[in-house]
Image: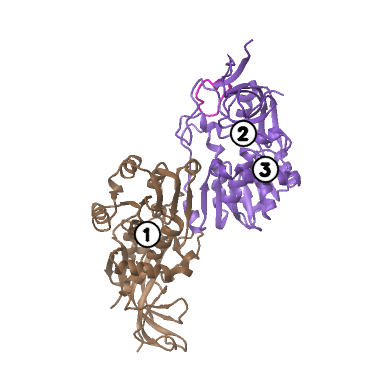
Chain colours: A purple, B brown
């Protein structure tokens, strides 16, 4: 009996904000295993803002997904059948096999996940790419010092919510922006942010930042870009570090986004703006994961997941990121 | 007999490009000395692009020059009379007493200059602020490695011409932009730049940069800002360092300059843009001066000075900076 594999493929290259019709669900037979391969059934897949760049034609750090190809992305699943000596049915494994129910893999780019450590979804969030992005981005690029004011945009998202909590652990004053009152309450009420605001209800970003960061900003962890980032430049302190992590404000732009020229502020404030990709720190992921796991155990880091059920809802969950529908890490439960 | 002091004061706050009428020459009597003071006669004064910021009302790293005040700036001169135990007539001294023939000072912010080391004008150029800007900006912010491609804008200026030569000493491939064919010839013919172009004759900066930096750009020493800098962002390599030293393209802007949003490139290229003020490195100036003096002696660093004669021409020399009239360091000889 042939098993049917449901997959979400890229149907069209999105123009601006992706639409459901840019994706298509297809059914293909799962091929039989040859020696050295094993079959994985997906439990969770991750949707992340960076994927917008991966489905655009623009030159970036990786080849774009082609039309008709399965959408890329981080996944965690369970081995259902194996002809690979290193894996057996029942193992939980993590990889990048993308938006599909099943995948035949050979172990390349796949890692075992120890389910006694944490529940498997965390490998796509707090212990995975977003967690490592927050951990290394803040600590290695932002270099926060005790007493610094750290401002985080997109603060209720998978990365931002962790950045703020790590900054608190490091003795900083932490301020965040997010897109709803519920998120703002979560930041200040649950996560210990010193202040937060709903950017959608702020007309004058400069004035708001002066109010919530009266001592200026020493570290800006930028997930967003655009006009809010412009305003931050007017509020940075001497020696400020701007961690350029994401620019979600622009990912769906249909013409090259323009804004004020800001470099003069970098001179006057002797400040630094630095971009990074989490893979820069791949050699240190174990260190980051161990530290994050320890902080979670000590209840010093909390994380939240927004989970939708069903592979067919992956495109909607992905598109929802750009509307700020997620709190913390957005996941799609595919099975189990 | 009272000595008359001729001074250039700020007459009006410039709007856009400064005009001669924004400055005024006044004559005041030189006051008599009290104990602990000495009288200096100016030999050379420096005009530099940064002064545009000092006469603007915009918030910056220092208080702006007020209307009626003597223009600020670096100076070198000769002690003509002293009631200070540390100084005697004939000493050559360096300071910031600004655009005037004479100054009564108390030694605060004044340093002795050893005329056996080099001729006195160098203390305003290659061994002074521009030299230290080039030295520490390139080495400490740009961190060039052998084999790197270093691109310098404003490459024939006081700072840029030194940046390129230091980068060559450090084993880099060096490319510069300047505003005339004469300057381009000087860069490639005299200073050893590997390539250079006249930005005024280039329509497509992207294409030109691809041509002169076929391996991409590892270090960008930015004296200019604006559209040329925008183009550099599209040509940077992974791990690039952008040294934000000056933004002369914008100093005379009458409305906030706008341009493409560029931070996405910092992420994709894991790159850094960092501003600085030379005063950050004040504690290490002696090291920088000794190294520069040694390189000059070894003929590994050349420098050029453009000198106009007469205090009354200081405003014109300053305004000329924005038209690219200077080759290397622009100075005004006030006396001697």
Whether the residues at callouts 1 and 2 have beta carbons within 8 Å, the answer is no
Residue B187 pos. (x, y %): 27, 55
What residue sits right under mark 2 in the picture? A111
Residue at x-position 30% and y-position 74%: B119
What residue sits right under mark 3 in the picture? A161
Instruction: Between label 3 and label 2, give the one nearer the viewer.
Output: 2
| Element marked by disc 2 | strand
Tag count:
3
* C-alpha distance separating marks 1 and 2: 64 Å
Which image quadrant: the N terminus of chain A? top right
In this picture, residue B325 sits left or right of residue B110: left
- Subunit of label 1: B
From this view, report whether residue A11 is shown above or below residue B72: above
Whether the residues at callouts 3 and 2 have beta carbons within 8 Å, the answer is no
* C-alpha distance separating marks 1 and 3: 48 Å
In this picture, residue B195 sits left or right of residue B31: left
Instruction: Between label 1 and label 2, give the one nearer the viewer.
Output: 2
Within 10 Å of the Cα at label 2, are there few (<14), some (14-19), or many (20+) other Cα atoms? few
**Res. B13 image quadrant:** bottom left
| Element marked by disc 1 | loop
What residue sits right under mark 1 in the picture? B18
The verdict on a common chain for dots 3 and 2 is yes
Front residue of B86/A110: it is A110
């Amino acid at each position: 009996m042939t098993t049917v594999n449901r997959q979400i493929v890229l149907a069209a290259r999105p123009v601006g904000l992706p639409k459901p019709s840019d994706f298509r669900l297809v059914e293909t037979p799962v091929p039989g295993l040859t020696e050295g391969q094993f079959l994985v059934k997906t439990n969770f897949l991750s949707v992340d803002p960076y994927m917008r760049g991966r489905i655009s034609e623009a030159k970036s750090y990786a080849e774009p997904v082609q039309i008709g190809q399965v959408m890329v992305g981080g996944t965690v699943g369970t081995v259902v059948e194996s002809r690979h000596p290193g894996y057996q049915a029942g193992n939980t494994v993590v990889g990048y096999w993308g938006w599909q129910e099943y995948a035949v893999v050979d172990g390349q780019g796949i890692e075992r996940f120890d389910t006694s450590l944490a529940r498997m979804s965390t490998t796509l969030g707090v212990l995975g790419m977003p967690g490592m992005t927050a951990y290394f981005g803040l600590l290695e690029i932002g270099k926060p010092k005790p007493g610094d004011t750290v401002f985080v945009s997109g603060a209720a998202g998978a990365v931002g919510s962790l950045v703020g909590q790590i900054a608190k652990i490091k003795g900083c004053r932490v301020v965040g922006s997010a897109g709803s009152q519920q998120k703002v309450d979560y930041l200040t009420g649950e996560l210990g942010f010193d202040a937060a605001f709903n950017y959608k209800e702020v007309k004058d970003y400069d004035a708001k930042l002066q109010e919530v960061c009266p001592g200026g900003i020493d570290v800006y962890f930028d997930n967003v870009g655009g006009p809010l980032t412009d305003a931050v430049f007017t509020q940075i302190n001497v020696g400020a570090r701007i961690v350029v992590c994401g620019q979600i404000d622009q990912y769906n732009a249909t013409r090259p986004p323009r804004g004020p020229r800001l470099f003069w502020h970098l001179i006057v404030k002797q400040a630094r703006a630095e971009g990074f990709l989490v893979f820069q720190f791949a050699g240190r992921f174990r260190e980051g994961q161990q530290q994050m796991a320890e902080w979670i155990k000590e209840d010093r880091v909390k994380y939240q997941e927004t989970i939708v059920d069903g592979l067919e809802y992956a495109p909607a969950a992905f598109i929802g990121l750009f509307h700020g529908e997620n709190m913390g890490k957005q996941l799609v439960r595919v099975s189990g």
